[in-house]
Amino acid sequence: MIIQMVNVCKEYPKQQVTALKDININVEKGEFVFLTGKSGAGKSTMISLLFREELPTNGQIVVAGRSLSRLSNKEITVFRRNVGMVFQDSRLMADKTVFENVAFAMKVIERPWAQICEEVPKVLERVGLKNREKHFPHQLSGGEQQRVAVARAIINKPLIVFADEPTGDLDPDTSRELMGLLQEINAAGTTIIMATHDKEIVNRMQRRVLVLQHGQLVDDQVGGWLL
Ligand code: ADP
């Protein structure tokens, strides 16, 4: 099991919001899991708990063998470097080239420069951006920017990639291409957890679907999004 959530609740007491209520899930290594539900259902909250940006109010979360409530600050940094994350807005550094954006993820884990120079072009080729190394983010289309974000998420060979609405700003064709890329990454063994409210994508992919409604898990099955 690569992800386990046991009786997980997340409350925001000041706003009197219960964002997640009593969530229990297990995810096996290599799965592709959609996290779906209407806006406000709790998808982003779940991703931020799994990425250890936030702590649950109650319950336990274990990701890649680590109990997330017991990590020191240093361990949190190490944990985050061992899982990939793709956001809706690619969050690339605007003043850095495509190469530098991806290389940065290797620099922070102190990989040698020779290895960076070898691996960054390889991963860029893998995501279909072979001749874009010297481009700056504003010189790329939205779909290309998301490919850079995916390259950055996978460069350190994480066991898991979390994606929060990665196709949210893309047109349908570009979304389809990005999903193809995520599918390839999953086929090579990386577990993917993707939050989306796009029913068309979920129904086309026929993968495991977790459905959230007002913070509760109301469905967990393989296939389309029926609710
Ligand atoms: P989704 O990603 O499905 O749109 P969210 O996880 O963003 O849903 O939000 C779930 C609920 O939690 C919403 O009611 C939202 O307003 C609330 N919420 C999310 N983050 C916070 C926060 N930092 N403080 C207070 N309430 C929040």
Image (spheres, rainbow, N blue to C red):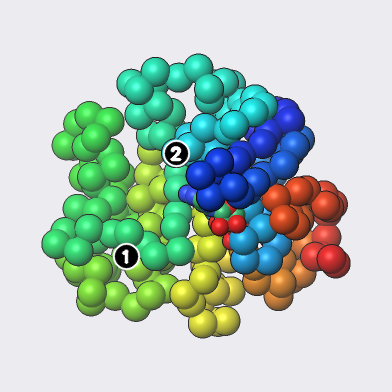
To which quarter of the image does residue 97 belong?
A: bottom left
Q: Which mark is residue 130?
A: 1
> Quadrant for ligand 1?
bottom right
Dot 2 alpha-carbon crowd within 10 angstroms: few under 14, some 14 to 19, many 20 or more = few
Is 172 situated above or below 223?
below
The image shows residue 111 at horizontal and vertical percentages of 24, 31
The image shows residue 197 at horizontal and vertical percentages of 64, 67
In screen coordinates, is 61 left or right of 118? right
Label 2 sits on a secondary structure element that is loop
Can residue 5 be seen here? The reply is no
Q: Amino acid at mark 1?
A: Lys
Which of label 2 and label 1 is nearer to you? Answer: 2
Q: Amino acid at mark 2?
A: Glu
Residue located at (23% from left, 76% from top): 139
Q: Which residue is mark 2?
A: 53
Residue located at (39% from left, 65% from top): 89
The image shows residue 161 at horizontal and vertical percentages of 52, 45
Q: Which mark is residue 101?
A: none
**Quadrant placement of the N terminus:** top right
Can residue 12 be seen here? The reply is yes
Residue located at (83% from left, 52% from top): 218
In screen coordinates, is 54 left or right of 225? left
